[in-house]
Amino acid sequence: MMEVKVKFVNYKEKWTDLEAVKQNHELPRAFLQRFSKIKNKKIKLSSLAGMLLLIEVLENENLLHILNSYAVKSKGKPFFENQKFWFNLSHSRDIVAIAWSLQGKVGLDVQESRSIYPGVKPKIMHEAEINHIRYQEDDYFFECWTKKEAVVKMTGEGLSAGIHKINSNIDNGNINGHAYFVKNFYIAPTYFGAVAAENEFEILIKN
């Protein structure tokens, strides 16, 4: 069984001056190229926080030497070329999170709970989810949504995969030829998270 580790932080509390912290690290060229193109300040800060969290994880795993092999796929998913270290990042408001494994591909999504416009649900939810007894609950929506996002981030297809095809009531399946396993986890009462992997797995929270 795969082991998937997860860590999440409030980046505004952890790094009170991200730009200053940035100066103390030599960041990968592929990251800096994308980072320089981000115009939205909040997205830019959370992106930087994600990179710093990744570096922290690599240091703890004694894998900092692979940082130079950091690359980005055509659809924007970062990875390490020719390395047996798979990871995925997600952020919501002030929370940034990372999932990683030494055994196979992973996907991660975190979302802060909030009100959802009713017209959104039918567009992204599977028929089985629409017919579920909890369909009207916002908490149920975020449990479903984070699972779907984690799956398509694991496959690397993103939203173009057609997340309405994923029945998140079932913790494993296949989408567009990609087998997946997926589980929810909870960060705090107002935050939901999910991890997906290509094989059966257990989640280890490393906070």
Image (cartoon, rainbow, N blue to C red):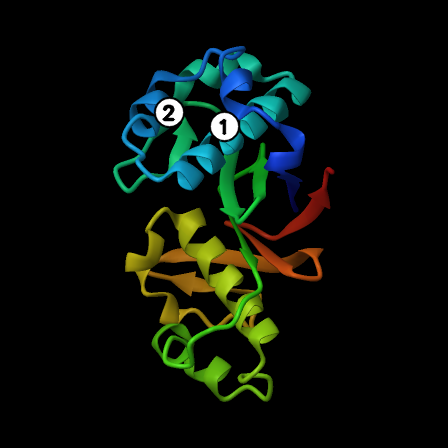
As helix, strand or loop, the secondary structure at mark 2 comes to: helix
Q: Which residue shows up at 58% across the image and 80% down it? A: 137
In this rendering, position of residue 29 left or right of residue 185: left
Q: Is residue 107 visible?
A: no
Whole-percent x, y for residue 165 in the image: 37, 71
Whole-percent x, y for residue 74 in the image: 25, 37
As helix, strand or loop, the secondary structure at mark 1 comes to: helix
Q: CA distance from mark 1 to mark 2?
A: 8 Å
Asked whether disc 1 touches disc 2, contact meaning CB atoms under 8 Å apart, the reply is: yes
Q: Which residue shows up at 71% across the image and 56% down it? A: 188
Quarter of the image where one finds residue 96: top right
Q: Amino acid at mark 2?
A: Phe
In this rendering, position of residue 76 left or right of residue 106: left
Taking depth in this image into account, of 18 and 89 the one nearest to the observer is 18
Q: Which residue shows up at 74% across the image and 38% down it? A: 207
Whole-percent x, y for residue 9 in the image: 65, 39
Label 2 crowd bin: few (<14), some (14–19), many (20+), radius 10 Å: some
Mark number for residue 31?
2
Q: Amino acid at mark 1?
A: Met
Label 1 crowd bin: few (<14), some (14–19), many (20+), radius 10 Å: some
Quarter of the image where one finds residue 177: bottom left
Whole-percent x, y for residue 129 in the image: 49, 80
Taking depth in this image into account, of 149 and 103 the one nearest to the observer is 149
Mark 1 and mark 2 lie on one chain; the one further toward the N terminus is 2
Mark number for residue 51?
1
In this rendering, position of residue 110 left or right of residue 37: right
Q: Is residue 160 visible?
A: yes
